[in-house]
Image: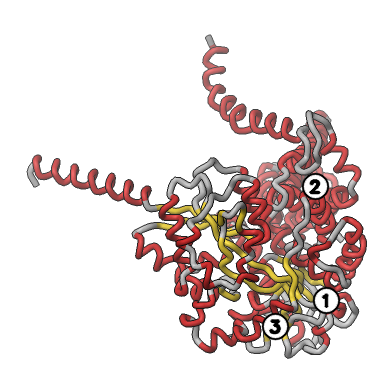
Amino acid sequence: MTRKSRLLALAASVAAITVTTAANAAEELNALVWCDHTDPALIEPFEKAHDAKVNLKVYEGTGAALSIIDQSQPGDWDVLVIDSIDVPRAIDAGILGPLPEDEMPVADIDPTIRMDDQTMRDGKRYAVTEKYGYNTISFNKDKVDPADMEDMTALWGDKYKGKIAVYDYYLPVEGMVAMGLGKKTADLSDSDLPAIRDTLFKLKDNAKLVGDVVSSQTALATGEVDILVGGGEWVTAGLSAENPALDWILPKQGGVRWAQAIGVFKDSKKQKLATEFVKYILSPEGQAKLATSSCYWAMPANEKAGADLTDAQKKALRWDEQPEYVKNSQLYPTPSPELDAKMQDVWTEFLQH
Amino acid sequence: MEGVRGSLFAGPALLYTLLFFAVPFAVMAYVSLTPSTGSGGAGLSFANYAAFFERSYFLGAMANSLVVTAIVTVVSILLAYPFAVVLAEVVPERWQRLALALAVLPFWTSYVVRSYSWLLVLSSNGVINKALTGIGLLSEPLDLANSRLATVIGFTHFFVMLLTLTIYANLKQLPPSFRKAAADLGAGPVRTFVHVTLPLTLPGIMTGAFLTFVLCIGDFITPQILGGNNELLMPQLIMLQVGRRADFPMASALSILLMIVVTIAYFACARWLRLERSR
């Protein structure tokens, strides 16, 4: 190789590295998400279609997300997935920016699921509900009598002592316990907390562990426990093919309905790409992949996703029973910051009990 | 001139300590005095420290941390000492390096992987329960995983190796003539161990015990994975403040309190070692 050709090769290499780096930097998207968004089957089609790289940071619970955002610089994050019920908090904190309503498939989402009261403000849409399900009771029907699970109070009785795991998220589980005590999640106040606390302590006496999404799911799947309080289709639907004994139920007192929404950070420097990502996730294709994501399955918000799901998948998700389930469920509690702090104190006591 | 050169050599270490310890510590101490998230307070105060002593679950977490750490430290010493003696005195010299390498093998694996491995071993369907129920010793599996016992086992597995190293190093420094002299004076093996070997290896034990104490009391991973959230230890409580509540002032106050406990342990250990040397 001559000196000239060596210099040319060097220059070409430098140029290639520069172009690649620039291209990568221009096409990276940072998303703060629940773990269901990390499935490559969901993310890769978007990355290929837009020649982009989506960096995903997983969190559990809105408090954790707000903590991460609090430690970040404006512009660090582009896309946020957050509980629909907490979208107003994100709007109040100036985290989310408005989305182009006309580009979102909102007409394909049932208004009850869409939760416009939470996801819109002053006529502007800040997030779109993308997935929903229930925090209720998952169980192994080979080990547990399904009739017992129709009444939530069985969870704090003596029959299943040491056979229970509890999902480590204070809002849905305290909401569930409140429903078990005949209270409405929307009306919770300070005066309800002593009864919730006492019942949680009884539940803890029966519990073998209190775990996050993965560890509680694993405990049920491996037979370490037979019941998961706070579980639901998000725990059992994805595992039902391998272990048909895993089931879930909305007891007669009902279950807590969760919904997660997707939006774009107000300070994102990649508004266009971030909006494209939101549109992809809300498309029938993205919705079907999100509904059957490897971390947890749950109902897609977009009704048109049904065309991209198999009959077996729809059966596992209990597609046809949704109207009845929605009717028999209540939304997450929406406590004021003061009540939220007290509910977290109760949860800390529960963990320490 | 010598003094200037000495300062120049010490400069990088001092700068490092200042940047990565003193400054962050000062910031943390300041933040710990600011109002807790959602408290509605204003200005600097000791309210977060007062809250620690007012809430039973905060005190409970500190008590749990101290009890678990004490158990782990004592059990690790009891297991590590004979292991170190065997390594230093029974294993032939040429095999000692290999034996030491094998002893530190657990350090080579990821801490998280090691904890999850223990969870698999201790679970209801794990190796221990399968073996015990398989040979008919048990009709029902034992509740080993997701408990304080599991946390202690996970910690002990790690810290036995650490203590073995410090005690082994101490044993190797011990001149064989000391024990020969004791034997010449009529002491049997037990008396020689109690009156000569053990007192002379106490510095190694104390150094290892202090390291075990510090690393154990500040660890989040092992109790989080193996404890099953059935009780909270201080690092878990601190993580709850940061991860769930974004309450950095309270997390800072709890961290400072944990550091005070570690500092007391350090001074107790240092004072004891000084007293030992001055004897």
User: Which residue is more in the foreground, B198 or A85?
Assistant: A85
On residue B198, the disc is 2
Dot 1: what SS? loop
- Tally of numbered discs: 3
Taking the spot 81% from the left edge, 56% from the top edge, the residue there is A343
Q: Which mark is residue A324?
A: 3
Residue A85 falls in image quadrant: bottom right
Task: Chain letter for mark 2, please.
Answer: B
Q: Amino acid at mark 2?
A: Leu
Considering the image in quadrants, where does the C terminus of chain B appear? top right
Measured as percent of width and height from the top left, residue A251 is found at 79, 81
Q: Are marks 2 and 1 on the same chain?
A: no
Q: Residue at x 72, y 67 (%)?
A: A331
Q: Is residue A124 above or below residue A144?
A: above
| Labels 1 and 3 within one chain | yes
Quote the CA–CA distance across marks 1 and 3: 32 Å
* Pointer 3 local density, CA inside 10 Å: few below 14, some 14–19, many at least 20: few
Q: Which mark is residue A26?
A: none
Left/right of residue B60 with respect to residue B178 in the rendered view = right
